[in-house]
Amino acid sequence: MSSSSMVARTATHSPLSRPTFAAAASSSFDEAERSVGISAFVSPNTPGFAAVSKARYSDFVVHEVDVEGNIARLESLEDNLKETEVAEEEKSNTDTDKNTVDGDDMSKKRSVEDSTLALEQSSVKKLKTEGDACGNGTNTANKEADKMSNDDKLSEAEKELTKLVGEEAAKGAIKMLRLWEGEIGDEKVEKNFTLPFIDDKDKRRSIHQLIRSDLLVPFALADTVEKKVRIWHKRFEKEMPNYGHFPRRGDGRGRGGQGRENRQAKWPSDRPNYLRFVLYKENIDTGTAVKELSRMLRSGKGGRHGRGGRGGAGRGRGGRNDSATINYAGMKDKRGVTAQFCTVYRGTPGDLLKINGIPSSQGSGCGGTSTRGAALIKVGHFSYVGDSMGLGSLGGNRFDIVLRNAWVDESKNGERIEATKAALEQAARTFQENGFINYFGMQRFGRYYDTHITGREVIKGNFEEVVSIIMRPKGDENDRYTDARRRWENRFNGIDMNDEKAVLEAEKKCAQSVLRDLGRFMNCEASLMNSLSRRPRDYKRAFQSIAKNMRSMFVHGFQSYLWNCAASHRIEAGGHEHVMVGDLVLVEDKSLLEGGSGTSGLKGKTVKVLTEEDVKGGQY
């Protein structure tokens, strides 16, 4: 620890063994840091200290900052765009109605979806409590409606509609629905019923919500024309002017519940293509949180699932123009409370707000502080933007970090407290005066500090060794996982390696066996075993089955290791106070707004190699 000016060590320990912990932590982490290329420090003579970081999730708080300096904060769970979208919907309905000549022309112009749920994505009620959002109120009413006969549903709906538009209009609308349901006579009836002019936007919204409730959703659809709500019987949905404009709840057509045309449904021409929102999470990493959101979007909208990635490719499965793909600028820690900006292609707040209604106990992850051992995912603060998030498309991050149980030496309690306080104050001053070396920290190299080793073998093309490193036993896993990893290590015991058929069969059976014993979040291992259980000994193919962003992390880990080694060598060779011949100096760094590549990539950056003349003249 003496080599570091200000380093927080993450560790667990018993309060009864603090002196031993301090010494052991110092030695253990110094060795771990050297293994990833960290061996030089700005202030090597400043005493270091041991401390516990992330003891609680709330000890590590991260707020992403975008390129314009906006800080990602989730301050509301409401749909802040609903007024805008209601106006767009009504304008769209009016414009479409003006373009309608007669029934034949109308049916020719229809596309693929029903406009009655135009407000579904914009009329989400405020979530007062997590419990209210997760099963009370509307859900209870829907369950009661499920038990009612069609006649009872229509009767109850008439009572509710009367409260909104009066008895006469309500009776006329419900009568129209009953006639088309064949419950009363063969009287000639119109295909829709137009309610009186309603200037109150909230009242129109309430009518649409009633139409979408379980009381009327089996029978009715609705649209709005010049502030008049029209109620249609469902059999005439394809004759509605805006048929195809908005997704319809419960559409089961096509792969994943939605046909190709539906995925290409109309989008308001004056609305940007991407919905930006703040993703707030506790005790879950960004990749897993995005996977949960994508799964929800996939089930709700029927789109094909694209892996949430840092930017996405924009083409093919998982590309950024997939309506179930969430794009983001960078990964945020699992063990922490984080807020970051994300984008989804042609999404609406209503698509995403459903996640706020899922109880934390049903989420992914474990061990949260405010959620009794579960992960927490919430979204909000929506806006439409012209482009998606991508790797490095941020200005930075703001951190609030708490260090606990700081420890300097093994003195008696009173002396130890004073010594620790003095060491922390000195470290803080040194940090402020001298800065720090911008090393890649330990988390870049994975929990077991072997990500860079795996990346090195990937670059060498030694995929059998890659699989071996990922699958080898880890030090602190439970017996079930350790046993599974050891079975994999010993899969060829007693097998004649010259007998190719026996070797393939042994690996296939072992992979199948190990796969059954892997944990829920052992995604890399599961991908490898799943692939090798079908194509044994094809290690390159197995590695390629791992999610792309995770495969990249291995190579990035090795790049980070090389940077750390180079930075350590530079400080050891020439110190940190003066530049040297051959140093690389960043002389221009354009932001994303100025046409640069932000925190990632070389676009907009100009680097100069210092010559002896530059150093002597101070020109850099």
Image (tube, grey):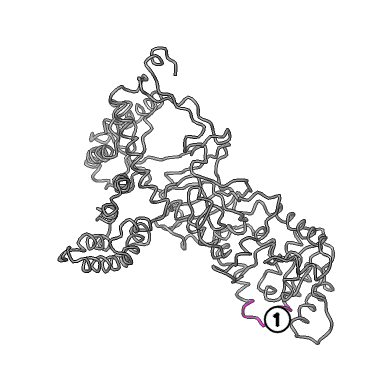
Residue 148 in the magenta stretch? The answer is yes
Q: Secondary structure at mark 1?
A: helix
Residue 229 in the magenta stretch? The answer is no
Circle 1: residue type: Asp
Query: Quick one: 494 or 105, which is closer to the camera?
Result: 105
Magenta-drawn stretch, dominant element (helix, strand or loop) = helix
User: Residue visible at 28% across and 24% down?
Assistant: 573
Quadrant (top left/top right/bottom left/bottom right) for the C terminus: top left
Question: Residue 268 appears at what percent x and percent y?
Answer: 70, 54
Query: Quick one: 68 or 2, which is closer to the camera?
Result: 68
- Classify 320 as above or below 440: below
Q: Which residues are magenta?
A: 145-155
- Classify 540 as above or below 415: below
Q: Image quarter for residue 34?
A: top left
Question: Residue 168 appears at what percent x and percent y?
Answer: 84, 73
State the count of labels: 1
Indicate left or right for 615 with 224 as reference. left
Q: Image quarter for residue 22?
A: top left
